[in-house]
Amino acid sequence: MIEGAEPLGLFMAKGSIVAGCLAPHPPHLVYAENPPQNEPVSEGGWEQLRWGYERLRESLADVDYDVLVVLSPHWQTYVGTHFIGLEKCKSKSVDPVFPNLFRFDYDLNIDVELATAIHDQAKSDGMSVKMMENPDFRVDYGTITSCQMVRPEWDKPIVSISSNRGLSYYSVEVMQEMMMQLGRATAKAIEKSGKKCVLLASNSLSHRHFVTETNPPEDMSKEHITSHAMHLWDMRMIDLMRSGKAQQLIDEMPEFCEQAIAESDGGALTWMIAAMGVPDQPATLHGYGTIIGTGNAIMEWPCYKWGEQ
Amino acid sequence: MSGEIVKSLVVPAHPHPVLCPEKNEGWQKIRDAFDQARKTIEESDADLIIIYSTLWPSVIGHQIQADPNPEWVMVDADFHDLGSIPYSLNIDADFAHAWNTANKERGLESRTVAYHGFPIDVGSIVALKLLNPDNKIPAVICSSNVYSNRAETTVLAKSCLDVVKAQGKKAVAISIMSLSNRMFTEPIEPHEDRIHSLKDDEWNRKILEFLGEGRLEDVGQLSRTIHEQIRVRKVVAFKPMWWLSAMNDNRNDLTGEVLAYEAIHGAGAAVVILDPKSNGTGDKEYDEDDVEFYGGDRGVLDNPEDSVNHGVELHEPTTSANSVNTEKAPKPVGSYPHARREGDLIYLSGVGPRQAGDNSIPGGPIKDAEGNPLDYDIKSQTHAVINNIANILEEAGSSLDNVIDVTSFLIDMDRDFQGYNEVWAETLGRIGPTRTTLAIRALPTPIAVEMKVIAKI
């Protein structure tokens, strides 16, 4: 435990969110790390972001928590929000977009009890939800990448939440309302569970890709943001997070999603901010970098330091 | 060899017709329509199934499946509770590689994928399970690029046709797509299924009316409107009709038949089969630019602003008497026309591969703005030169068939002659003009080939 840290759970014997992390998931990061589970081999690359994840891991190293709760936009569902309901998931995840970079043998544990609790809470709050219990289901690369980069030991169970594409059916505003509701349901379920959780919002910021790939893909001489406008948007969003202006970030999300083709349109960041109670506290920036032109920030809201709200 | 598209199909993407057709009368009708289409394919002499799937999005250009035997078990992201679909497919890897090469020759970003465990998309699996259950006919599957526009999608089809013809294939072209794609966002009981809204249903019926009349190109023309009106903004827009239309030479006089139209969880699902035989109504106007080579912003990592400018001032073509100019050819780099008529002959100014409009160079420029040499594709450049020549001749009321004499200029004879010669043989070589090929030190823009042409009108 970090000196001075006083997780809510110790005082209230109830669960708590000890940290929320913006944890982008481009598979390039796993590819560059060369973990034994991933088939392709690289010469590195994207170090600015990988060092950022290193700083995040160091920041979380002494934080006591039980489970990672991750929402990934690469498990896209259109019929409500889904939760993995299998205790063990073991298979190979191959990214259909970058299969040359990500072919990952995973073996992970799911906290089905907590997943079910969030599912049930969301359902009782009126949301459309479903548990995923098909043993042949393959976990998406976004979930795996974010978890691998935050906790490569895979010694914590996870809760895997799908991205319900409210944006696709309605608007960013409606998506945000749905994700705010899901975030509040997540917080309530965690509190009732008695568990200490780290939340992971698995998404990039600006999300305009280059449509060509360098050879090798990790040739960093070609890596940069796709446009100055994207850079300005990313910096604006990071400034809002660093200065504790989560509500303003939520307010500006529709314009950000539209103009920066932001991957936060999948709802992960909104969900996490809502689960943390739209905090006024600043987030810590651990790293920023681009991946095939997209903007990526690694941020941490160290809730365990905030004390009782 | 002479290949052709023997049938074209539109089929839906959801797993219900495979996993639980019996639960809903409409789903069973879709399943029955799949079975009917399968019999039609089996009764044809098709030896290849080509799939363009909207369920497989890509970012790095288009991806083509090249694993000869991909095997796994597919579970749908939404409808995982309906069950799993094991698959073991027969992929024509040779065709996949040839299509990939043809894409590059036409200026497209493209690559093949062949990785154990690659997640074949649900739409492709459903189609192949129901249309080709015994893997009797080899298949090839292509992704749908999330950024591609009509020009790129059209060129993708043309490069596919290049290979179909070169390999003498009798191919079935399949677009996997919903019509309206708005699903119910809540779970429903099977008996509750219906098209999500009356508006979606009306648009679906209009699309099917056109397809039933064989008016593929008209549906292609409406694609953007259809997308705005009845398509949820999922990853891939309503592009498959552009591809399917181009696979059929953008015709409007095919013989179409709608085998089924039903709802699957609210989305519009149809099985349509189109025969290339003319329905006798006469073709209709094709009123979009018919793009042969793609010159869009695919070189974005290499700073396209430099490559498009090329550091040379462009001029409007001069318009003195007997001049022939066209917007379908690149702007001149000096004060001269694209061509000039004299008697019954037409003399063309030197023609390079630059593209009208964006000034891009198919196959890439030979050097960057700093003069550093770049890898380029001489075959793509040569194709583009000949295409520009054809456009100028067409403007003059002539055609490639009337070319009499050609003088070609190559900036690197050792490197480029073979590729240039191969394209020549496939094109002008079949017509038979006289030819002189010269090695020169440089051309005004960073191109590798230019041709000077004399033709009859």
Image: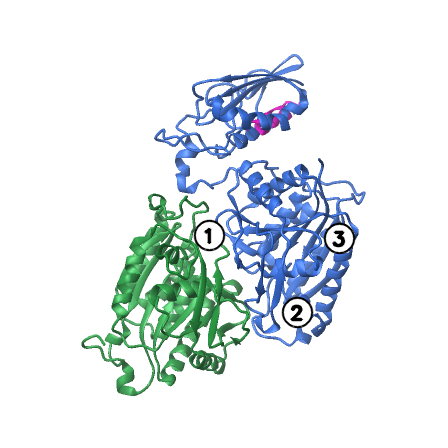
Chain colours: A green, B blue
Could you tell me if the residues under marks 2 and 3 are in contact, i.e. CB atoms within 8 Å?
no
The answer to if A167 sits in the magenta stretch is no
Q: Which chain carries label 3?
A: B
Residue B310 got which mark? none
Answer yes or no: are tags 2 and 1 on the same subunit. Answer: no
> Which residue in the structure is indicated by mark 2?
B19
Answer yes or no: are tags 3 and 1 on the same subunit. Answer: no
> Which residue in the structure is indicated by mark 3?
B41
Q: Is mark 2 on a helix, strand or loop?
A: helix
Number of numbered markers? 3
From the viewer's side, name the closer residue of A23 and A149.
Answer: A149
Q: Mark 3 packing: few (<14 Cα in 10 Å), some, or many (20+)?
A: many
The picture quadrant where one finds residue A216 is top left
- Magenta residues (range): B385-399
The picture quadrant where one finds residue A155 is bottom left
How far apart are the alpha carbons under marks 3 and 1? 34 Å
Residue A283 visible? The answer is: no
- Seen at 57% across and 30% down, the residue is B383
> Which residue in the structure is indicated by mark 1?
A100
Tell me the amino acid under the disc marked 2: Leu
Q: Check the image and name the residue furthest to the top.
A: B343
- Seen at 43% across and 71% down, the residue is A108
Tell me the amino acid under the disc marked 1: Asn
Which circle, 3 or 1, is nearer the viewer?
1
- Seen at 44% across and 75% down, the residue is A110
Q: What element carries label 1?
A: loop
Q: Mark 1 lies on which chain?
A: A
How far apart are the alpha carbons under marks 2 and 1? 31 Å
